Amino acid sequence: MLLKTLREQVLEANLELVRRGLVLYTFGNASGIDRGEELVAIKPSGVPYEELTAEQIVISDLAGNIVDGNLRPSSDLATHLELYRHFANIGGVAHTHSEFATAWAQAEQPIPCFGTTHADYFHGPVPVTERLTASEIAGDYELETGAAICRRFAELDPDAIPAVLVAGHAPFCWGPSVAEAAHNAVILEYVARMACHTLSIHAETRPLPRALHDKHFLRKHGRNAYYGQPKETK
Amino acid sequence: MLLKTLREQVLEANLELVRRGLVLYTFGNASGIDRGEELVAIKPSGVPYEELTAEQIVISDLAGNIVDGNLRPSSDLATHLELYRHFANIGGVAHTHSEFATAWAQAEQPIPCFGTTHADYFHGPVPVTERLTASEIAGDYELETGAAICRRFAELDPDAIPAVLVAGHAPFCWGPSVAEAAHNAVILEYVARMACHTLSIHAETRPLPRALHDKHFLRKHGRNAYYGQPKETK
Amino acid sequence: MLLKTLREQVLEANLELVRRGLVLYTFGNASGIDRGEELVAIKPSGVPYEELTAEQIVISDLAGNIVDGNLRPSSDLATHLELYRHFANIGGVAHTHSEFATAWAQAEQPIPCFGTTHADYFHGPVPVTERLTASEIAGDYELETGAAICRRFAELDPDAIPAVLVAGHAPFCWGPSVAEAAHNAVILEYVARMACHTLSIHAETRPLPRALHDKHFLRKHGRNAYYGQPKETK
Amino acid sequence: MLLKTLREQVLEANLELVRRGLVLYTFGNASGIDRGEELVAIKPSGVPYEELTAEQIVISDLAGNIVDGNLRPSSDLATHLELYRHFANIGGVAHTHSEFATAWAQAEQPIPCFGTTHADYFHGPVPVTERLTASEIAGDYELETGAAICRRFAELDPDAIPAVLVAGHAPFCWGPSVAEAAHNAVILEYVARMACHTLSIHAETRPLPRALHDKHFLRKHGRNAYYGQPKETK
């Protein structure tokens, strides 16, 4: 993939987060990776979205060396890189402070799967990380945030649950591409919002039975999926 | 009715769901039936609303055979058909994952009639289905969803309560036409939203007394209705 | 005042309710009175707001006889008239099913004065009527609704508390003109919304002390008001 | 700084509050100070935002004498002046009745620091003042409001916590400039909103550990900040 194309995809995904009401001011950032070249394209830090251009997207290698671009990358770059190094299949990462998903992260509660909207996208509760220790915070903080996410997924499949809540912080989402990472961030916010209302209506709500959770996830994903139009073979 | 007209009505109802903020991405679907021809027109699966055209609306017979159209129908078609087969007077069905109605469905709580806004449209609490069994989920899932709705209405009048909450899933609404089905979906979301706030303000709120519930439903519906302008006789 | 002017004011107030997000579809209605002529102008029943014109506004006398206009008046006309007959100083009435004020009406709880925003407009809690009896509902329902409001204000000053919650129904607001009635409906919704959040944050919240409540109401109203620009003398 | 420039900055900050949905009708006001001239520019009282011009911004000295402008200043001027006299580094003040921050003020609860969004801007819980006494309310009310805020900050740093909740009233925010004061008002509302949801999800939520709170505040503020692009030296 041309770097220009990757930059444009990353720009577009960042703007999608704005259009969907997930970001306030300069909050949030999305990145994409070229797995062949092992290059990551990420939003620069603190630039207003309305002025953001594809050329301003910063290019980094997987070790965090800036390869191209005149601006500082998002301060969360080290978190993104840790995810790319550990989750082999992901092509994009999106981080927001969206209202309800962040509230769940602040409450340090995993989002239970209360319905099929959740099950269509996340094959299990959306997990929450452990709090970072004081020494992790004092050390390489953003890297440690990524490490805490990876530890949380030690026995979970990041391709089946493409989102996490960082305790006391906010969500990170991912997907096969940066566009799908941003899409998952939008869905996560909607699911988080409805789960909050669900508890408000009935505090004792039970999670979806596993059979229905599986059914919905698998009708959209995997070999026997039958949702949407058949993918064209080109 | 010409198929072209039915397709345009179905397109318009689907777009109304978008304009009223009831759908996210490709969620939701509305269909309409030509009772004379026994043909159902429904939104295709997974097509973005902004690209949707009347020509893309899929035509099915009541057994689920695709009669016209090049795209796959909504994956919920079998649920719609089951409703058309059992509810003799309905001309349209609308299914959404709207925020608050879905939260009630997830909480598996019927929406009590707390006020006249509810009573104007739904002549009783909005009921919630039983959960599907594991074997129903493993079988013809969408058909079984429709069957669970019909069982729930065994002793209810679908013309007087044109909506249901599918447990752990989301609402289905219906009406004499696809436009009215979509209208009822919009009202249901508003009623669900206010009922949630009502419980938040006062958890012990009592439902409306039956006399007032009847009064409001009947001033808009039935022979002695006096709301709105007199229907013109053409 | 010319009837044409009154009709335009009533149209404008109805449209203000729409612009402020207080009405869904054809819900809600606002009216104004010419005290000299004893004529009331009110929105017709069930006409979409986007098509509403000043000419369609219906003119009634205080006994409910339609004096001018080709359409049926709002079905709530009898409630409005009862308010005009009993509250001598009011020039307009606005009725909505706005989301949070309606939730308080459904919960049958008066809105406590939790803050100065409330105190600036309503000199006391916003009261809630008694439920209507079965025979009142079966009788002249809309008139009885107005009568229940007037009974609730037997020992309250309608000029100092220009709003009420009808139990299990929704709010009615009023003011010196139809524009001010609509303005009060917008403020009531905002106050109702914040009061709901206030209880959600801290269920034991105490109402504002009377001294502060008086201070805020009186700095905007009455002889020593000092909020806003001095009223011009013409 | 030219008075004309200050007026334009104050106008722009007031309009930013409107664009961000923090004000209803004429609620709210923002002011800025020229520390060299000791002149304060503030929104006039009760003028609709859509008609507001830079020329209408009122100029006062620190004692409250109107130095320039034809309109009455905001009725909250005395509160703003008290803040300018006591908080030596602030260049602007913004007061709103924004929905969720006001709900916290009404509940008389400080907003706990539940997450890094809060920590990025406010280095501690957002405090709430004591209620004013009856004699303070009867006296110079707006001045006493300012005095109550200053008392609340006797042992707090207003530069590190640029916001307060006035009990039973609403928030006041400030910053190095009027633009930053308005920016802080927008962030405060967002933080207040998420904190309300956080409690709704999990009433026992613990505040952020101090180490993480410090980390986030200091990565955006102070000598070793590394968020955003390096400030240019001109």
Image (cartoon, coloured by chain):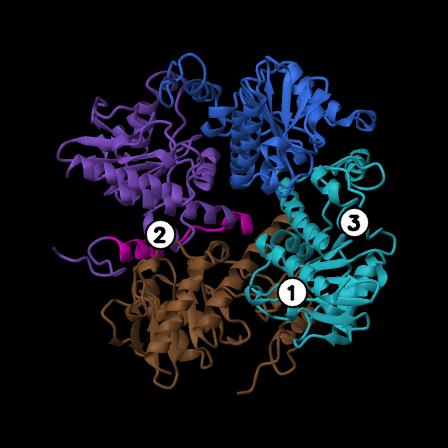
Chain colours: A cyan, B blue, C purple, D brown
Q: Nearer the viewer, mark 2 or mark 1?
A: 1
Residue B32, horizontal then vertical, whole percent:
59, 23
Q: Residue at horizontal 65%, vertical 65%?
A: D116
Instruction: Work out which residue is located at the far right of the displayed protein and give it.
Output: A155
Disc sitting over residue A161 in the figure: 3
Q: Residues within 10 Å of mark 1 (few under 14, many from 20)?
A: many
Q: Is residue C78 above or below residue A222?
A: above
Asked if labels 1 and 3 share a chain, the reply is no
Q: Main secondary structure of the magenta part?
A: helix
Does A114 sit left or right of C82 as displayed?
Answer: right
Residue numbers of the magenta segment: C198-221
Label 2 to label 1: alpha-carbon separation: 35 Å
Q: Residue at horizontal 75%, vertical 58%?
A: A92
Q: Name the residue tied to disc 1.
A: D116
Does B138 sit left or right of B16 as displayed?
Answer: right
Label 3 to label 2: alpha-carbon separation: 49 Å
Kindly indicate the quadrant of the structure image that contains residue A179: bottom right
Disc sitting over residue C119 in the figure: 2
Asked if the magenta segment contains residue C219, the reply would be yes
